[in-house]
Image (spheres, rainbow, N blue to C red):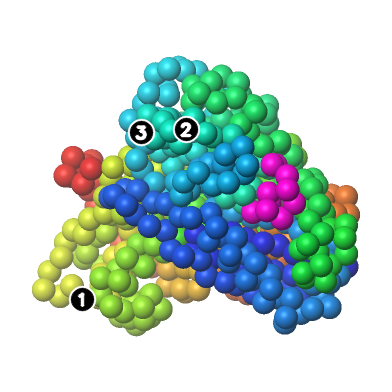
Amino acid sequence: MTYLGIDIGTSGVKVLLIDEHGRALGEASAAAVEPVRPHPGWSEQNPTDWWTATLAAVDALSKSHPSELAAVRGIGLSGHMHGATLLDKNDDVLRPCILWNDGRSAAECVEMEAALPGLRAIAGNIAMPGFTAPKIVWVRKHEPEIFARIAKVLLPKAYIRLLLTGEHVEDMSDAAGTLWLDVGKRDWSDELLAVTGLNRGHMPTLVEGSAPSGALKREFAQRWGMDANVVVAGGAGDNAASACGIGAIRPGEGFVSLGTSGVLFVCNDKFRPNTEGAVHAFCHAVPDTWHQMGVILSATDSLNWLSKITGQNQAALSGAAEAQFTGPGEEIFLPYLSGERTPHNNSGARGSFVGLSHLSDPARLAQAVMEGVTFAFRDSQRVLADAGTRIDRLLAVGGGSRSALWLKMIATNLDMEIALPEDGDFGGALGAARLGLCAAEGASPATVMTMPPIKTVIAPDKTLSAAYSDQYARFSALYPAIEEAIS
């Protein structure tokens, strides 16, 4: 018996195959067409690109591991959150998906909160442009002909589920990021839906992430040599899936994610909203569990931006920064290339370098970018602590976790040990596969969501703590000082 995890990202799709003991058997990936930015602050992607990449990735796994893939009993899905995938009555896509890092709907967020003063109490979150609901208000205002044809609104992984199973279904963790969910009750809110001109009929059915959501269509079971009765789990939004992948499903357990975006994630046993610091309070992918997140919109994406500007790849930049590193640099970077969520909630904020000199070269700029993202994580830790949230254990996931220097910076600034699991870049896919196992076998998440083998543990560098505290103070003073200039 094997189980397949499919992780749908904006840059591509990763698939991971595990056995009944959770051991990785094989993996594959396929790139997707990069998102487009029709205007500054906008970000869109064609949903068919995710589907093409999904088929390519699973096809590749079918060729490399045919017998193992044929033994699949359960499939789990993970995906980037908040994207507005709009479908008509025939399930045809009406327009490109407006993605999580799109900031066009700032005015609509203000309108929503004015129309429903109790919005934050129900949703557990501030109305932010990244969430799905404000995007629909923008479509209603600026593309009324599209809005009039909306039959369903799906999140990215739910669209892939629809093609795999024919079912309109979403899990609680992803649904919590729409701003349509009553997060405490784990159900759609009629009040929140009404503010955007929609109703429950426009929404997918809700299930827990570890529960079945449908069965794989016969045509795909045949394509990949599988049995006709393959269960597809509810799955999870990418961050909740990563938490399942590294075993963070109990209070105080969490992770730091260095992906395109950055996330400081911690589990809670109750719904604990804290909107004052722009903290996200969402349902977890397992029943009766919630989580909080501090979110940075441009983490490794900031280094990717610098890579394009300098003509050097990310590995070369991070390697050069590590080679010359002696401590905090003179240059400071505000990593707000796509706006920011935690703690500023400013979709109009933009990035900035401060402290440039004739000595500033690509290596020093790369260090500044890594430190800027690190300080943004420190901001998130601060507002989580303000809410009384306890973080007992942190693991690192995401592509940026391959940088030993970056993890050392984060461990030092958060003053916490950070464990790096093996195959950390596949956290979302592993979590999805584990959810697929739970759904297919009726297994308890508590027995399945265990900590993976740890490659290394990164300890804070106490010799740099004071210097980084001073540098963080400079970083913290910059945003309020130049907010008007960079917004």
Residue identified by numbered label 1: 361
Q: Quadrant of residue 219?
A: bottom right
| Amino acid type of the residue tagged 2 in the rendering | Phe
Residue at point 21% right, 46% down?
486
Q: Residue, x 32% and y 52% (percent of image)?
A: 38
How far apart are labels 2 and 3 at the CA level?
9 Å
Q: Earlier in the sequence, mark 3 or mark 1?
A: 3
- Does 440 sit left or right of 316 as displayed? right
Q: Is residue 106 above or below residue 294?
A: above
Residue 323 versus residue 94 in the image, above or below: below
Can you identify the residue that label 2 sits on?
Answer: 147
Q: Is residue 164 above or below residue 178?
A: below
Type of the residue with mark 3: His
Q: CA distance from mark 3 to mark 1?
A: 43 Å
Q: Which mark is residue 142?
A: 3
Q: Secondary structure at mark 1?
A: loop
Give the alpha-carbon distance from disc 1 to disc 2, as whole Å: 48 Å
**What is the span of residues highlighted in magenta in the rendered image?**
160-169
Name the chief secondary structure element in magenta: helix
Judge the density around disc 3: few (<14), some (14-19), many (≥20) Cα neighbours within 10 Å: few
Q: Secondary structure at mark 2?
A: helix
